[in-house]
Image (cartoon, rainbow, N blue to C red):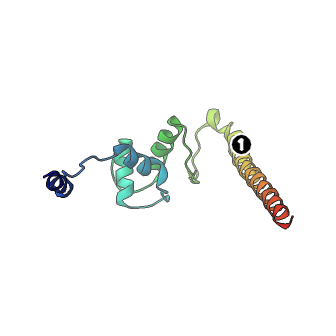
Amino acid sequence: MTLLAACCLLFTPQPANNYIDWAAIEQYTIYDYQYEYGEQSGMVGMLQHWLGIEIDNIYGQRTHRAHRQEAMQNGKQLPLYEIHVADRDFGAQVEQWRPLVEQAIQDINAESGNLQTLQQSVISKSVRRHQFLLMGASSV
C-alpha cells in the first residue's frame, strides 16, 4: 500500500510553476542586452517600456539618454555612443566650456582604457607566473 501511495505521488502531475522572475527580465533588458545605436527591435521597445518613455522601438538619442540615466542611478556602466549635434550653438555662456568638457571626456575614456590594459597586464603576469610554477613543479 505504501508503494502504491508513493507511485501515485511520484506520477501525479504537479501544478506548473507560474512564477515569472521579473527582476531577471529587468536585469537582462536594461543591463545585459547589448543595444546598438539606431537599432530597431522589440527589445528596444521592451527597454523603453521599462524606462517609462515613449515606445517607438528605436534605440536613438532619447532612448540612449534615458538608458544611461537609469544605469548611472544604479551604478552600472553602458557604452557611450558618439552623438553629434551638427552646427548648433548653445550660446556664449555654454560654449565657453565646450573645449574643457571635450577634453575631460577624452581623458576619462583614456583612463578607462589604461585601467583595462593594466588589469589585463596584471592578469597575464599572474597567469604566466602560475604557469611557470606549475612547469617547475612538474619537472622536479
Label 1 sits on what residue type?
A: Pro
The residue under label 1 is 99
Local crowd size for mark 1, using a 10 Å CA cut-off: few (<14), some (14–19), many (≥20): few
Left or right of residue 18, residue 108 in this image: right
Quick one: quadrant of the C terminus?
A: bottom right
Give the image location of residue 129, x and y in percent: 82, 57
Q: Nearer the viewer, residue 22 or 9?
A: 9
Residue farthest toward the front in the current orientation of the protein: 1
Q: Quadrant of residue 39?
A: bottom left
Q: Nearer the viewer, residue 64 or 114?
A: 114
Left or right of residue 8, residue 112 in this image: right
Give the image location of residue 24, x and y in percent: 40, 47
> Does 86 sit above or below residue 103?
below
Q: Quadrant of residue 75?
A: top right
Q: Nearer the viewer, residue 99 or 48?
A: 48
Residue at figure coordinates x 83%, y 61% from the top left: 137
Give the image location of residue 35, x and y in percent: 48, 57
Residue at figure coordinates x 73%, y 55% from the top left: 120
Kindly state the secondary structure of the residue where label 1 is placed: helix
Give the image location of residue 42, x and y in percent: 34, 59
Residue farthest toward the bottom in the current orientation of the protein: 139
Total marks in image:
1
Left or right of residue 112, residue 37 in this image: left
Q: Nearer the viewer, residue 63 or 78?
A: 78
Left or right of residue 59, residue 95 in this image: right
